[in-house]
Amino acid sequence: MNQEACDLTTGSLWKKILLFSFPLMISNVLQVLFNMSDIAVVGQFAGPLALGAVGSTTTLVAMFTAFLIGMGGGVNALVARYFGSRNEKDISETVHSSAIISVGLGIVILLLGQISSPWILSLLGTKPELLEGAMLYLRIYFLGMPAMAVYNFGNAVFGAVGNTKKPLLFLSAAGVINVLLNLTFVIGFHLDVAGVAIASVISQYISAVLIIRALIKSEGTYGLRKKELRLSPKKTKQILSIGIPAGLQNAIFQAANLFIQAGVNTFSATVVAGNSAAANADALVYDVMTAFYIACGSFLGQNYGAGKKERVKKSYLVSLTYSFGTGLVMGLLLVLFGNQFLSLFTRDAAVIEAGRFRLTIMGLCYGVSAFMDCTIAAARGLGRSLVPTIIVILGSCVFRVAWIYTIFAYFRTMQSLYLLYIFSWTITAAAEILYFKREYRKEMANY
């Protein structure tokens, strides 16, 4: 086995999952902090309107990036399975086909973002005073989508073979550059919204170049080789059959959140800015918890490929325990230190007060989302992607839209808006767990 890779089919799962997840956790936190720097720099040095403009784009950007992350999850599941079964030909074909697919999808999303952004922002009822800045930010930001697609592909491959340290190093380097460029463009050149968008795009291409370079230099079976760079019809079908539903699941999930943003936009610009500042906590908590979801998919995939049925089940349970505990602890810390967290993004007392309300409700609910997301990752590790996607669409997307037009439409309060998260997570998690339990039993019966 190549020294860069790690066998996830032996040893203590409690220890290995934690060690595997820790670099991912740091990587995800850094990524969130670097993204937060966009909003923090704008909020501190460009004022509430610029903060609101960038914040108004958060859900829309997340919708497209979530699709790429979902595709990465599909790549991760397949590479991990073949790596666990030591099938070198399948590993190589999956990696090279995925590389081509990722670049193509990144370009498609770039074009879709440029075309659809004005229409979606208008549909959301973005405040007139925020619209121009939001459009400028999006037009620049979407130029980095091909790079983001490539980085997610490389990150998925390294994660599948148990190497989570390299992506951390690359993201750290790109992130530091992002923060420095943010400060330079906003404070030095007074570019405000455009400055943070340009900094983000540059850092995304730096991380993509670094991770592709590492895959090319790798001597493992998962390394990129120019002469092998072609689409395998069989592997392309497998990648798309898992990745597309996973990507659409994430994107549709975020699309439902656009309706939530539309609900937020019915309140004052101060509330919109407060919501934007507080929403940074979502990314922080979710992305730390995501480290354990990635671990779940990688461990479950390798052990599934190796035919170790007991470790398949335990990989899920250990990852679920870690992710739930993390969400619970981080949520409580945000409730306790909400004012200090929000002061990173704004000095406006009214904006902080509006953000504090959101933090209090969400902080008490984050842990519940683990039961939904970790179970989805486990199902994906078994090669199941379509049904979990349908469950998410019904339980978290359709349900959220229905809530907006019924419960929220009746009460018209921020509390009635934010409470939809805990209800949708609970309903979706229950259905996902029942489905995974059935598919696990069916799959393990074949061993």
Image (cartoon, helix red, strand yellow):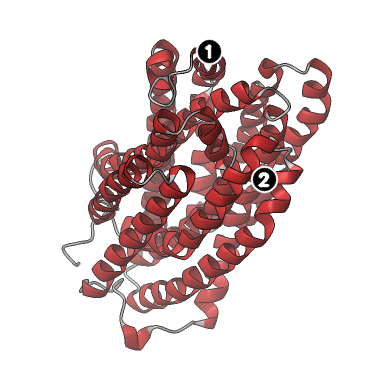
Residue at numbered disc 1: 353
> Where does residue 356 sit, x and y in percent of width and height?
51, 15
> Where does residue 243 sit, x and y in percent of width and height?
55, 61
| Total count of labels | 2
Q: Is residue 307 visible?
A: no
Marks 2 and 1 in Cβ contact (< 8 Å): no
Relative horizontal placement of residue 371, taking residue 404 as reference (left or right): left
Q: The N terminus is located in which quarter?
A: bottom left
Looking at the image, is 410 positioned above or below residue 112?
Answer: above
Question: In the image, what residue type sits under mark 1?
Answer: Glu
Q: Identify the residue at the far front of this view.
A: 189
Question: Which residue is at 83% across, 25% downward?
Answer: 406
Question: In the image, what residue type sits under mark 2?
Answer: Ala
Which type of secondary structure does the marked residue at label 2 adopt? helix
Earlier-in-chain disc, 2 versus 1: 2
Question: Which residue is at 77% across, 18% downward?
Answer: 412
> Where does residue 324 sit, x and y in percent of width and height?
44, 28
What is the quadrant of residue 203 in the picture?
A: bottom left
Relative depth, front residue between 385 and 175:
175
Q: Which label sits on residue 274?
A: none
Circle 2 or circle 1, nearest the eye:
1
Residue at numbered disc 2: 255
Relative depth, front residue between 170 and 286:
170
Relative depth, front residue between 297 and 290:
290
What is the quadrant of residue 325 in the picture?
A: top left
Relative horizontal placement of residue 43, taking residue 362 as reference (left or right): left
